[in-house]
Image: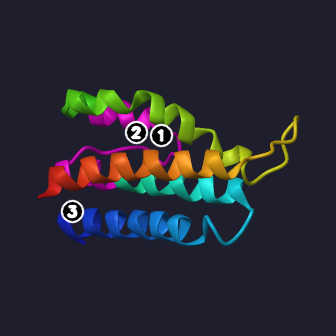
């Protein structure tokens, strides 16, 4: 598969995660899982960007690691360090039992959606 096609597939899958989170945020109260979908959207978008520019990355779900690779190519990605740290915790925390129970709120989910949208819009502009 050509890297351009693979990059587009990464973006499409990421867009689907965000669309899902946006569609159900007012319908369900499983806010941690919605935050996870936001984490996934950003992960897939960062991987799509890296694929498009030809930077190889190891199999990982760690947003800070992916962001550092993006920053290495384009320093303007550095403005998303805080958002990436916020979203990164949802890969594990929102889906698996942890030492201290997590109670995620609708406000938290809406913030995650907002952050994911900002990063996705930023990456989309890189592709246009």
Measured Cα–Cα span from mark 3 to mark 1: 21 Å
Disc with the residue nearer the chain's start (3 vs 1):
3
Q: Which residues are magenta?
A: 47-70
Q: How many marks?
A: 3
Mark 3, residue position: 3
Please indicate whether residue 76 sits to the left or right of residue 103 in the image.
left
- Residue 23 spot, x, y in % from top left: 53, 72
- The quarter of the picture where residue 4 lies is bottom left
Outermost left residue: 128
Q: Residue visible at 32% across and 28% down?
A: 79
Numbered mark located on residue 63 in the image: 1
Disc 1 secondary structure class: helix
**Which residue lies under the disc numbered 2?**
66
Q: Is residue 14 left or right of residue 100?
A: left
- Give the CA separation, mark 3 to mark 2: 17 Å
Q: Main secondary structure of the magenta part?
A: helix
For the residue carrying disc 3, how many other residues have a C-alpha within 10 Å: few (<14), some (14-19), or many (20+)?
some
Query: Can you give x and y, in whole percent of width and height, for residue 18 in the image?
Result: 46, 63
Helix, strand or loop at disc 2?
helix
């Amino acid at each position: 598969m050509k890297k351009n096609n693979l990059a587009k597939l990464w973006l499409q899958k990421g867009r689907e995660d965000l669309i899902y989170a946006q569609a159900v945020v007012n319908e369900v109260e499983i806010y941690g899982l919605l935050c996870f979908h936001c984490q996934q959207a950003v992960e897939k978008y960062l991987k799509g960007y890296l694929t498009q520019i030809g930077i190889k990355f190891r199999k990982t779900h760690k947003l800070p690691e992916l962001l550092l690779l993006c920053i290495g190519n384009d320093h303007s990605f550095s403005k998303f360090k805080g958002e990436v740290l916020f979203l990164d915790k949802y890969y594990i925390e929102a889906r698996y039992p942890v030492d201290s129970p997590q109670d995620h709120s609708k406000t938290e989910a809406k913030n995650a959606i907002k952050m994911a949208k900002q990063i996705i819009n930023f990456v989309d502009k890189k592709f246009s």
